[in-house]
Image (cartoon, rainbow, N blue to C red):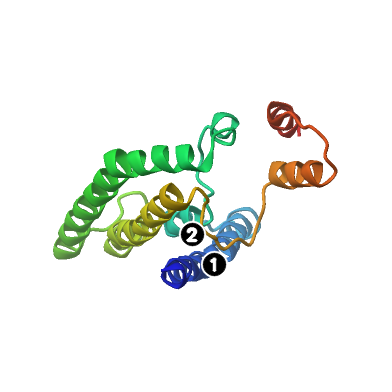
Amino acid sequence: MQSYLLAVDRFNAAVGKLFAWSIVVLTFVIVYEVASRRIMGAPTTWAFDASYMLYGLLFMMAGAYTLSRNGHVRGDFLYRQWRPRTQAGLDLSLYILFFFPGILAMVYAGWVFFDLSYQTGETSSFSPDGLKLWPFKLVIPVTGVLMTLQGVVEVMRCVICLRTGDWPQRLSDVEETEQLILAEAAANKVAVDPSKIELDEAKI
């Protein structure tokens, strides 16, 4: 079971890291557009479309990766104070009531948008070149499928935690500053107020 959970984590992490390179392409596009406009006096007719498509690609394809790392936003100042079983019970309820209905609706609607765009040869109306939109819209249902796959894994983690009282192992490659501070405080047996950490991070 655990090997399956970690395998899905690795797959979605690989997808997220692969598409993270789109930020490099996006940077190149923006730099080229600025240089072309300011230095050569010849702005491109495609950079605007390419920039929002690349940013959308980065944002969408990183969703399942972020979920695999438990990195989506939640009310941590309350959540972290609860026992693992309480956390798992709340998470499981939210996945069933909100996550899966929303994600499955996104898959369905995204496929309809993509199919219509592909069948009609839809192009962007924001630039003279009118880049094809169907590849960009295909990202919507693909992201939904990846999120659904990772959501199933997260539900399984919730069930395991409800049974054992502890969260199963999760892959990680980054850690938030507050987690490092809390871990260091625990090692040194120092009491730390999590709300103060959040306030300090907000000042930074």
Percent position (x, y) of residue 86?
46, 37
Alpha carbon distance from label 2 to label 1: 8 Å
Percent position (x, y) of residue 5?
44, 66
> Residue 27 appears in which quarter of the rendering?
bottom right
Task: Give the position of the C terminus as an image quadrant.
Answer: top right
Whether residue 118 is visible here, answered yes or no, is yes
Whether 1 is drawn above or below 187: the answer is below
Percent position (x, y) of residue 6?
48, 68
Q: Nearer the viewer, residue 21 or 201?
A: 201
Residue marked by disc 2:
65
| Secondary structure category for the residue under label 2 | helix
Residue shown at 51%/66% (left/top)?
13
Q: Residue furthest front?
A: 164
The number of discs equals 2
Whether 200 is drawn above or below 89: the answer is above
Q: Nearer the viewer, residue 50 or 166?
A: 166
Residue shown at 42%/55% (left/top)?
160
**Viewer-nearest of labels 2 and 1?**
2
Which amino acid, by three-letter code, is at mark 1?
A: Lys
Residue marked by disc 1:
17
Percent position (x, y) of residue 179?
69, 45
Q: Nearer the viewer, residue 14 or 84?
A: 84
| Secondary structure category for the residue under label 1 | helix
Q: Are marks 2 and 1 in contact (CB under 8 Å)?
A: yes
Residue shown at 34%/44% (left/top)?
95
The answer to which of marks 2 and 1 sits earlier in the sequence is 1
